[in-house]
Image: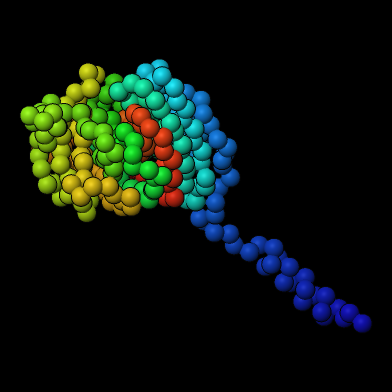
Amino acid sequence: MFSFVKLSALLVLVPFVCSAPTSVEERATIDTSSHCGLFDSVTAGTYSLLLDQWGASGASSGTDCANLVSLSGTTLAWKTTWTWTGGNGVKSFTNINVNSGINKQLSAISSIPATWTWSQSTSSVVADVAYDLFTSNSAGGSAVNEIMIWLANFNAGPISSQFNAAGQAVPIVSNLSLAGHTWNLYQGSNGANNVFSFLPTSGTITSFSGDINLFLKYLTANRGVSTAQFLTTAQGGTEATSGSATLTTSAFSLVIN
């Protein structure tokens, strides 16, 4: 016989079983379908996946598709596959755009912790993998400075105002130690704004973890960038010019504090 005492004990336990705690890092439900539109955008948490195929008209043929894989807390996994033929200019910059914390004055930013672990199917392409930041004289205003932090240079090259006899870009500063790596700094203009490009001296960095605010602090302390400017854009992605490749990101996180 099922006693009243046993039944009472079970009823006491039921609320505890049903209310088991869930992890704060539980994976969010996101759109993981493939997107190939010229300027498709997919939002996930504090990020957006952007297919910025702004130079596609310069190619004789090509496609660029991307998809989100997972989101856990502030860490995103994503993938892009592209192929471009013809033309010497950049065709696309498929990237993760940060939607939270932007339009802060540089003087008000305490840190920008960032992690990025990725792999690429081939290096026989013309492309880069880089963080891309923009600053302006006003919140949401037109860009004055572009700051690129390259993690990989696949047969491409930074914008530069100085070149050697062999036609190679010459850095304005060499062997800078920032965020646990050593960099060469290049400077030039893209026709619309001033461009600073930090390139690693050791080659490709496939697993980065550091405070990218250190790069902004270096520029404000040493290269004339005003701390009164605003950080209007913060992104990480791949600029693709020619060839075919798949970039797979297993972990991407960028938080503006």
Q: Does residue 214 appear in the picture of this structure? A: no
Which residue does the image show at 37% across and 18% down from the upper left? 58
Q: Which colour scheme is used?
A: rainbow
**x and y percent of residue 5 in the render?**
82, 80
Observer-nearest of 109 and 39: 39
Is 124 positioned to the left or the right of 30 in the image?
left
Rendered image quadrant of residue 136: top left
Rendered image quadrant of residue 82: top left
Observer-nearest of 83 and 205: 83
Which residue does the image show at 39% across and 48% down from the upper left? 119
Please tell me whether residue 77 is drawn above or below residue 63 in the rendered image.
below
**x and y percent of residue 106 in the render?**
24, 36
Rendered image quadrant of residue 85: top left
Is 61 positioned to the left or the right of 2 in the image?
left
Point out the image quarter for the N terminus.
bottom right
Point out the image quarter for the C terminus.
top left
